[in-house]
């Protein structure tokens, strides 16, 4: 079809286009009437209902126009659509719409269609085939991967210098800590999902185990953060082994659902065992970390430790603790990264990747599948535990609320959106998934809505993730054969 | 004994609801091999549509309960099906030939989107409703009461199951559906419109989930935007328990999960009932990984 539209002047089949758009409008009508058109409201006499007919009409009109626009692009008439959709998107800023949601839909939809039209105008074709898109994004992934040799040190240097920059205030450093926590979790989960190819929907359980290990050890035994950090990792790894041992024999989706169940079990235990864990109220007053057991970050010092600022001859500032936490999570995250990069070259890491590609072949070559998977699971759990105890000490307060399934979903989304197995992808995806919503905090209500839609859209656009590209870790022949193996790998 | 029968009835009606949702999971899994994570949300939407239909009927003036219930059922099933269809069309169909994880992530995104969509539009507070259907049967000198709603849930589920089995076994649509489940390429070669069959699978699953959503609203009289997640997970558990891909298995799994939950809350305490459910899931998967009625999976190299 695309070939034809290049050679022939575009012709529009209006009846078909209108029929198609009308159908889309009908679907939009059926979708919006019950939930958008009628709103339940609490009245003193019970539930009442409100009619919002203008929003339904606006939604239907937008869907109709959008569908017509898409059809026109598909038949090769892109330039007028480009202009019109831009007009619509700009109009979205000025016209008085019934709700903000519609404004977002109007601007967003207009821009998406405009981009499609722009691509069509530039390439004379409406759509790339799946194979072409795959190849194109594999090239981008490969480029980034090769560039990461230079990008990674620059990124690390920037991250290390960030708190010293003049723009860094308390708020930005806090966001930096949040981003790094998710980067660390993403890298940790990447070991299970990206390297070993196991779909883990309950990673947050280990995060929770780590957080609660530290909080409870500190509460009941008064142990310090530096003692608890390794302990939390060990406990999380142990829980990983305990869970992994029975379930790692399961395949694919069964495994996914069991890990999801395990994550929920941990959360329910935390809620219900209130005598021990504080129940839904959580644990408060979790002690802050000291400066490696040498100094404390409070003004006067605590626990027999001198205050940090006087020890180093600085002016007291509450920022010191935050900057220290920032560097702490940066180092923890880098440890995970270095570990992953190194272990990929060791027999264990190679066994993971081999298992991911074909576990039956691996078994017949004498690899103990359960043991190898268990190792991946336990190691990832340990890193989750580290991140968890860091989270506990940073927040000073934890409750089961922080460890819901949505957290697991976000971490998994980071790994998959970035491109499985790609360390750089995790960083990029974290910036997108966590950073963007942080930047638009004013849109609080729409944050999760757009987050969900964004996940769908990125998957539609790049089903293999943003930076998916796999060079085989070991190559027999430098040219040709290696590239072929790399393509097969994804 | 009376207490036992009471819990049995509660468990059966709860299990019927899980079973209805589980069918949606099991059919979708059977035909395209993905966990439709947004299915729990579809159930939640069905429940909301039923609630809204009821409120609108009240405004319009239709207050005769049987007619109102019938209209609620019809509208909930119809409009929820549109949601099921649209979700498949937008979020899953473009990913038909992608790596296995892509549709799952897309489904999780869809689930988050739908939850927040309903929360934004209908409000985060839970929606209480006066009981629409009151009254109950009593047995054993009033020791055991079976409310009409629970009874209706069980009867309606049975009726739907019979009709649905007939649909799958006897009609050409059912035949096409089973054919696609076995081999999509072959079915397409033989003239089955695979895309249409997959769409219809989602539509049927959504319609059954809507029934479950409406019944839950009638039984418990309160819903909120968050009910989809846990019900979805449990229904998926039920589908796995019964053997994923098997329709009677989904129903059986649902009933077993419902009974476990009812008896556990009745005799042990309701706080730990979810832990019991998940523990049983893990146990079943360890000792019988294909589920109770599932076919063993043959590994090919």
Image (cartoon, rainbow, N blue to C red):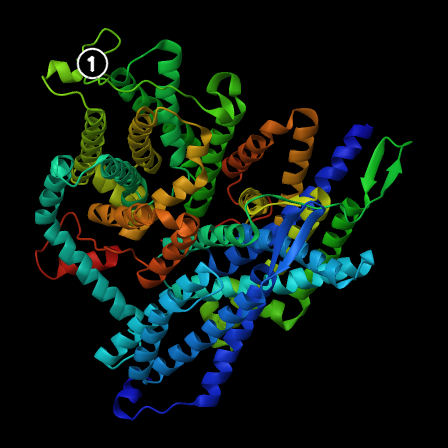
Residue A305 position (above or below residue A67):
above
Please indicate, yes or no, whether residue B248 appears anywhere in the rendered image.
Answer: no
Q: In this view of the protein, which residue sits in the foreground, B296 or A226?
A: A226
Q: Give percent across and percent down for residue B78.
A: 64, 65
Q: In this view of the protein, which residue sits in the foreground, A66 or B256?
A: A66
Residue A35 position (above or below residue A247):
below
Q: In this view of the protein, which residue sits in the foreground, B152 or A218?
A: A218
Q: Give percent across and percent down for residue A327.
A: 18, 30
Residue at (60, 47) in percent of width and height = B293
Residue B193 position (above or below residue B128):
below
In the visual, does B254 lie left or right of A101? right
Disc 1 on helix, strand or loop?
loop
Q: Residue furthest top?
A: A304
In the visual, does A236 lie left or right of B13? left
Numbered disc total = 1
Q: Which residue is mark 1?
A: A293
In the visual, does A45 lie left or right of A206? right
Q: Give percent across and percent down for residue B118.
A: 53, 53
Residue B204: image quadrant is: bottom right
The N terminus of chain A lies in which quarter of the figure? bottom left
Residue at (66, 39) in percent of width and height = B258
Please indicate, yes or no, whether residue A66 appears anywhere in the rendered image.
Answer: yes
């Amino acid at each position: 079809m695309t070939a034809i539209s290049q050679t022939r002047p575009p012709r529009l089949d209006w009846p078909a286009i209108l029929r198609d758009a009308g159908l889309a409008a009908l679907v939009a009508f059926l979708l919006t009437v019950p939930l958008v058109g009628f709103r339940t409201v609490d009245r003193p006499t019970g539930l009442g209902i409100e009619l919002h007919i203008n929003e339904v009409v606006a939604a239907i009109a937008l869907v109709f126009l959008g569908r017509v626009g898409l059809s026109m692009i598909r038949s090769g008439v892109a330039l007028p659509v480009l202009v019109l959709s831009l007009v619509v998107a700009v109009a979205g800023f000025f016209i008085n719409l019934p709700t903000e949601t519609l404004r977002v839909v109007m601007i967003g939809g207009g821009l998406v269609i405009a981009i499609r039209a722009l691509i069509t105008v530039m390439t004379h074709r409406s759509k790339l085939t799946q194979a072409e898109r795959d190849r194109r994004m594999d090239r981008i992934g490969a480029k980034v991967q090769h560039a990461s040799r230079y990008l990674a040190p620059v990124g690390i240097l920037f991250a290390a210098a960030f708190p010293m920059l003049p723009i860094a205030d308390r708020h930005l450093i806090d966001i930096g800590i949040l981003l790094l926590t998710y980067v660390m979790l993403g890298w940790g989960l990447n070991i299970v999902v990206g390297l070993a190819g196991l779909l883990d929907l309950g990673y947050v359980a280990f995060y929770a185990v780590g957080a609660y290990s530290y909080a409870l050890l500190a509460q009941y035994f008064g142990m310090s953060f530096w003692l608890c950090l390794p302990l939390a990792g060990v406990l999380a790894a142990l829980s990983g082994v305990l869970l992994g041992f029975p379930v790692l024999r399961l395949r694919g989706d069964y495994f996914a659902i069991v890990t999801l169940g395990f994550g929920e079990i941990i959360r329910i235990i935390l809620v219900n065992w209130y005598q021990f864990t504080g129940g839904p109220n959580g644990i408060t007053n979790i002690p802050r970390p000291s400066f490696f057991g040498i100094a404390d970050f409070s003004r006067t010092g605590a626990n027999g430790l001198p205050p940090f600022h006087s020890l180093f001859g600085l002016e007291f500032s509450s920022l010191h603790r935050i900057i220290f936490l920032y560097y702490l999570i940066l180092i923890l995250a880098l440890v995970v990264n270095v570990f992953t990069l190194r272990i990929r070259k060791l027999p264990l890491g190679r066994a993971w990747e081999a298992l991911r590609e074909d576990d039956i072949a691996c078994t017949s070559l004498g690899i103990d599948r359960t043991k190898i998977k268990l190792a991946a699971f336990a190691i990832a759990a340990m890193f989750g535990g580290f991140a968890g105890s860091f989270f506990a000490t940073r927040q000073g307060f934890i409750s089961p609320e922080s460890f819901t399934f949505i957290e697991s979903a976000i971490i998994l989304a980071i790994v998959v959106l970035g491109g499985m197995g790609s360390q750089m992808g995790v960083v990029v995806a974290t910036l997108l998934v966590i950073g963007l919503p942080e930047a638009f905090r004013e849109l609080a209500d729409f944050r999760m809505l757009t987050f969900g839609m964004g996940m769908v859209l990125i998957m539609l656009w790049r089903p293999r993730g943003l930076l998916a590209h796999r060079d085989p870790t070991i190559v027999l022949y430098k040219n040709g054969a290696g590239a072929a193996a790399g393509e097969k790998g994804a | 004994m009376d207490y036992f029968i009471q819990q049995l009835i509660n468990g059966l009606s709860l299990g019927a609801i899980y079973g209805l949702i589980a069918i949606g999971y099991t059919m979708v899994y059977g035909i395209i091999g993905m966990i439709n994570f947004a299915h729990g949300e579809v159930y939640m939407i069905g429940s909301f549509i039923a609630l809204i239909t009821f409120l609108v009927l009240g405004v319009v003036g239709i207050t005769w309960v049987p007619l109102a219930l019938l209209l609620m059922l019809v509208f909930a099933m119809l409009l929820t099906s549109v949601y099921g269809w649209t979700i498949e069309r937008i979020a899953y169909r473009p990913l038909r030939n992608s790596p296995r994880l892509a549709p799952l992530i897309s489904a999780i995104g869809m689930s988050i989107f739908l939850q927040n969509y309903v929360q934004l539009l209908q409000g985060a507070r839970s929606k209480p409703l006066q009981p629409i259907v009151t009254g109950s049967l009593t047995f054993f000198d009033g020791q055991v009461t079976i409310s009409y709603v629970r009874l209706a849930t069980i009867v309606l589920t049975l009726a739907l199951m019979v009709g649905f089995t007939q649909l799958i076994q006897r009609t050409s649509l059912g035949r096409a559906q089973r054919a696609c489940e076995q081999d999509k390429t072959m079915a397409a070669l033989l003239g089955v419109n695979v895309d249409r069959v997959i769409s219809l699978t989602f539509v049927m699953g959504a319609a059954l989930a809507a029934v479950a959503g409406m019944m839950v609203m009638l039984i418990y009289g309160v819903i909120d935007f968050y009910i989809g997640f846990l019900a979805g997970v449990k229904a998926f558990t039920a589908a796995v328990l019964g053997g994923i891909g098997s329709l009677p298995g989904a129903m059986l799994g649902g009933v077993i999960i419902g009974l476990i939950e009812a008896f556990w809350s009745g005799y042990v305490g309701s706080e730990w009932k979810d832990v019991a459910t998940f523990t049983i899931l893990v146990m079943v998967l360890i000792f019988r990984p294909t589920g109770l009625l599932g076919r063993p999976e043959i590994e090919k190299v």
